[in-house]
Amino acid sequence: MLTPLRYALLVAILISAAWPQSSTSMAPPADLDAYVAASMKTFDVPGMAVAIVKDGKVLVAKGYGVRKLGDPTTVDEFTLFGIGSNTKAFTTAALATLIDEGKLSWDDPVYQRLPGFVMYDPYVSHEMTIRDLLTHRSGMGLGEGDLLFWPHSTYTRDEIIYKLRFMKPASSFRSHYAYDNLLYMTAGQIIPAVTGTSWDDYIRQHIFAPLGMTHSTVTNANFKPGDDVAFPHSRMDDKLQILPFEALDNAGPAGSIQSCAADMAKWVQLQLNRGKFIDRDSTNQDSRLFSEQRSREMWTPQTILPIGDPPPALAGLKANFADYALGWMLRDYHGRKLVGHTGGVAGFVSRVMLVPEENLGVVVLTNAEEDGAFDAILYHVLDHYFHVPPTDWIAAYKSVNDTEEKEAAETMKKAEAARATDSKPSLPLERYAGVYTDVWYGPITIKQENAGLIITFDHTPSMIGDLQHWQHDTFKAHWRDRTIEDAFVTFALNPDGSIDSARMAAVSPLADFSFDYQDLLLKPAEKK
């Protein structure tokens, strides 16, 4: 039996033992700076920004490396990066505020809120809800229609949404997961339809301003020399190069936000606090951005995602479940539910991850297209807070990247070896020239230039390519802008030798899915 003295002594011992552990569990990894530096070096990333939020506190909001290759100006906590599809959670949060106000419901039919909304299938046009716009289960193919805005095109958001009616589904409605961007653009356009305020201004006024995200912007169009912005980078011809900023205003609700570690930390605080501002009095009617109910809904599974076996080097990441919610992806890791998303635009990739059970949030922003760089850092941080044996995630992701690049190179080498180099086009080159039309993209022009052919996507200024003969009636579009993935163009002939149509396909197995060449069917335009 414990005497009062012994009991008090035991309590004191337990408290003293627990206190250092609690302090340690709050602190970020002691080797965080070194680990970020190693990841940047391994994956050749010029600059990064990292934010860590734990138990409502911002523990880390810090920049690493440089904003621009060859320029010593360093990244800080206010340096802006393109966050790409991490924008999607902002769009759903904006809609959530309107639902809280009683102006919308997740299950409102889209056509009732967005007059003129039409999909290819009349049934889908009638049944599509706002929830369906946000959950990647429309029946559209992976990235279908992304060439309408990527690379930057002259089409407006409304023009792009109009073209949904011409896009044939790849599967039946609500039966399969296939990531898309166009329906998030559509979801964003519901905001001006209901409020009279553009998506852009609504995000500024109703999310950035109340959260104090004073550095963030919905566009990169207003960047000026000397601004605290990271420059985009990508590897081309096996060399890291600086890219021009890609204008994404027409894709705004799907991926145009630019933000920094300091601002994203505030966003993560709000999310972990279930829509309530950290520094507001709960009796204040303005203490919330959105209700706790909306928060639960945005983190509730909507679309089941397929779970495959990860590569051997990443075996520890095998999930027991994976779902898409509303602007967030859900999965598990070491028994905890993860709520997160990635983002990618030309020259930038990013990661936001929330662990509600641990009241933990992690943000990694980068200015190079290297997913392994941010994921290695993310899982290093998670392992620290989950108290699990550390894994060398940098080596693991580098191994996977090297294998993927090797396999892609071998695939392309085999295709080159199998090519019928002695074959000739069926027609004289001038017979391939002309204006072609795809039912959803629009005009694509092929014309003679010097002794060869060039191809242009008429609404995408940067898509000018030389058509190099590959074999038979297949040519390779070698784009002059080397950030654009090369594509095969294969012509089909009618019995009389005239051109019936042309199909396209990406050359590289590693081509981003947003280069959805396979969804195009080029038909010769009728001559007037």
Image (tube, rainbow, N blue to C red):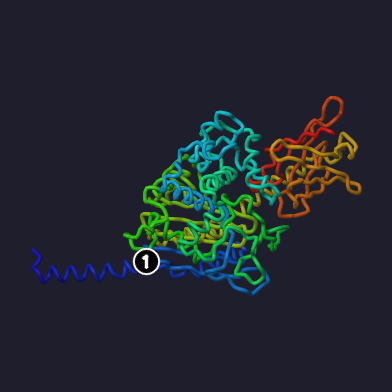
Measured as percent of width and height from the top left, residue 424 is found at 87, 37
- Nearest the eye: 82 or 190: 190
In this image, 514 relative to 327: left or right? right
Q: Which residue is mark 1?
A: 26
How packed mark 1 is, by other alpha carbons closer than 10 Å (few <14, some 14-19, many 20 or more), is some
In this image, 231 relative to 107: left or right? right
**From the viewer's perspective, is residue 509 above or below residue 365?**
above
- Nearest the eye: 517 or 46: 517
- What residue is shown at x 62% (from left), y 41% (from top)? 161
Return the residue found at the far top.
Answer: 495
- Nearest the eye: 228 or 59: 228
Q: Specify the quadrant of the image occupied by residue 442.
A: top right
Measured as percent of width and height from the top left, residue 419 is found at 79, 40
In this image, 162 relative to 30: left or right? right
Measured as percent of width and height from the top left, residue 302 is found at 45, 40
In this image, 60 relative to 66: left or right? left
Return the residue found at the far bottom.
Answer: 72
Q: Specify the quadrant of the image occupied by residue 297.
A: top left
- What residue is shown at x 47% (from left), y 69% (from top)? 31
| Label 1: element kind | helix
